[in-house]
Amino acid sequence: MPDPGPIGPVSAVPAATEQVYDELRRAADACFRGQPADHTLEPTALVNEAYIRLAKREDGFSDRSHFFAVAVTAMRQILVDHARRRAAAKRGGGWRRVTLSGAVVPGASREVDLLDLEQALTKLSELDERKARVIELRFYGGLTIDEVAALLEVSAITVNRDWWTARAWLQRELTQATAP
């Protein structure tokens, strides 16, 4: 992914969005993998909502990678906010559940509450911010190990190690969250 250079504040967001729209769409598709077909938020709506949030930013983006990283975080926040609204509307019943494949949590083929996942990721970011970013970029952004390494400016070996460690940690946390 060649870097087109700095991306300025709000006025440059439309150009940046055009440059990375396909990548944003791929990230949005990754967010919806494993979710029920009746999900009320569509990938295109997720990309559009992320665009609106990015356009409101007053500071610019240092480069295309920075823009994409901020966009993935915005999409994660949008999905979590959406799950919270749905849960509140149902007064605690029918929490939004997503299926985590073995790609995120080894051996997981069960549904996991998106809000439990968010809580676990928040806790992980307090312990190790880079490992939480790796999970966020891989799960919510659909990025490869090499893409995450380039974005975080670390080696692919480091990202792979963080990926495996963070997934094991998440599995333990999510298991404890669902234990009676």
Image (cartoon, rainbow, N blue to C red):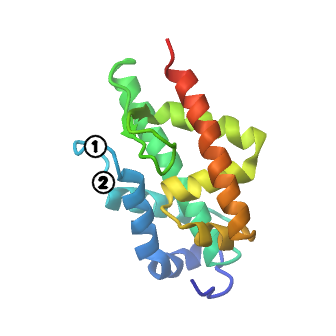
> Looking at the image, can residue 70 be seen?
yes
116 displayed left or right of 155 = left
Residue with the most extreme left position: 38
Question: Is 7 placed left or right of 139 in the picture?
Answer: right
| Vertical side of 11 occupied by 176: above or below | above
Residue type highlighted by circle 2 = Glu
Question: Disc 1 versus disc 2: distance between alpha carbons?
Answer: 7 Å
Q: Residue at x 61, y 72 (%)?
A: 146
Label of residue 42 in the image:
2
Q: Quadrant of residue 112?
A: top left
Farthest residue, direction top: 180
Relative to 110, does residue 1 appear above or below in the rendering? below
**Residue 152, horizontal then vertical, whole percent:** 71, 66
Residue occupying image coordinates x 51% and y 43%: 106
Tag 1 and tag 2, C-beta contact below 8 Å: yes
Question: What residue would you read off at disc 1?
Answer: 39
Q: At x 23% / y 45%, what residue is drawn?
A: 37
Q: Is residue 59 visible?
A: no
| Amino acid type assigned to the residue bearing label 1 in the image | His
Instruction: Residue 21 in the image: state x and y as whole percent.
Output: 43, 74
In the picture, the quarter occupied by the N terminus is bottom right
Name the element at disc 1: loop
Direction from residue 81 to residue 64 in the image, left or right: right
